[in-house]
Amino acid sequence: MPEALDPVPLLKHLQEHGVEHIAIGGLAVSAHGHVRTSKDLDVVPNPARENLERLAAALADINAVDDEAGDFDPDEIPMSALCVEDLSQGGNFCLATDLGRLDVFQWVSGVEANDLYAELDREALAGSVEGVPLRVCGLEHLRAMKRAAGRPQDQADLERLGED
């Protein structure tokens, strides 16, 4: 298993490029009160074309490539996150970068929405980590994602987040 990721350099890089996103996954679990390590940073980008252009440029700057050791089946990530047209298709990307692993989600099990970012935006929480502004998904969305994923780590997260 890869070592724990320090998400701050990736968050700072995304901020410097003006990429609007909402964090989900392990960082969101930590933001909701159960601090734990994670091997990656999971984000949902705003799907506006201008934002996806900034995201693609930010990814190119940190030499993002598909992470074949990731959690996705190769059929789930047939496109390139460095191509705005491919990002615009709404897929998910598991990426290895110079700053660590970054997973870009535009759909997730447990949250049914045509625009995942807009759905999460309604209940997202704002804060900062080491001075870097951060938005994370709301607790109910996080719980729904964790229930749908159902892996052992997700079950443990649900218990720690107060899921019955």
Image: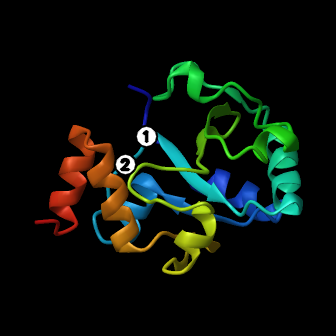
- Identified at 16% across, 66% down, the residue is 163
Which residue occupies the foreground of this view, 72 or 58?
A: 72
Quote the CA–CA distance across marks 1 and 2.
6 Å
Residue at disc 2, secondary structure: loop
Residue 47 visible, this angle = yes
- Identified at 31% across, 53% down, the residue is 146
Task: Find residue 12 and report its horizontal and vertical position in percent.
Answer: 70, 60
Tell me which corner region of the image, top left, top right, bottom left or bottom right, holds residue 103. Answer: top right
Residue at disc 1, secondary structure: loop
Which residue occupies the foreground of this view, 158 or 92?
A: 92
Q: Residues within 10 Å of mark 1 (few under 14, many from 20)?
A: few
Which labelled disc corresponds to residue 17?
A: none
Which labelled disc corresponds to residue 4?
A: 1
Q: In this view, does 50 lie above or below 95?
A: below
121 to the left or right of 4: right
Q: Which of marks 1 and 2 is nearer the N terminus?
A: 1
- Identified at 15% across, 59% down, the residue is 159
100 to the left or right of 24: right
Quarter containing the N terminus: top left
13 to the left or right of 120: right
Q: In this view, does 156 lie above or below 97?
A: below
Tell me which corner region of the image, top left, top right, bottom left or bottom right, holds residue 11. Answer: bottom right
Check disc 1 and give the amino acid type: Ala
Quarter containing the C terminus: bottom left
Check disc 2 and give the amino acid type: Thr
Disc 2 designates what residue?
37
**Residue that protrudes farthest toward the left in the picture:** 164
Look at the numbered discs 1 and 2 and tell me whether their residues touch, using CB distance below 8 Å: yes
